[in-house]
Amino acid sequence: MATQTTAEHELAILIVDALNLETVDPTQIDPQAPLFGGDLGLDSIDALEIALAVSKRYGMQLRSDHPDNQHIFSSLHALSEHIERERTA
């Protein structure tokens, strides 16, 4: 498993808290592993919950009609990178 960056770790904690994943240790989420269809068992409703939590925490919108959503939500790493890009833009 790849090591989480500080931003990825913060995001992993946010995801675990937002989705009430009580049996998931945020430090054990592989930044490169798929968020959906993988070990976490997340679905499209979870994506909406993540988007809402990100919006509240970081003050940015993850729009459902964004053409790159499949990539943005592909992994913890991809989501973290997108958030960092949007926050500094």
Image: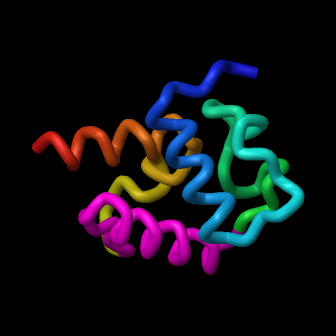
Q: Is residue 38 left or right of residue 79?
A: right
Quarter of the N terminus within the rendering: top right
Residue 83 pos. (x, y %): 33, 47
Residue 18 pos. (x, y %): 60, 70
Residue displayed at 61% across by 51% down = 13
- Give the image quarter of residue 27: top right
User: Which residue in the rendered view is the most extreme toward the top?
Assistant: 2
Q: In the rendered image of this protein, does residue 64 appear above or below residue 86?
A: below
- Give the image quarter of residue 42: bottom right
Colour scheme of the rendered structure: rainbow
Tell me where the magenta segment starts and ends, as one range. Answer: 43-64
Q: How many marks?
A: 0
Q: In the rendered image of this protein, does residue 54 appear above or below residue 78?
A: below
User: Which residue in the rendered view is the most extreme toward the left?
Assistant: 89
Q: Is residue 62 left or right of residue 17?
A: left
State yes or no: residue 44 in magenta: yes
**Which SS type dominates the magenta stretch?**
helix
State yes or no: residue 52 in magenta: yes
Q: In the rendered image of this protein, does residue 62 appear above or below residue 48?
A: above
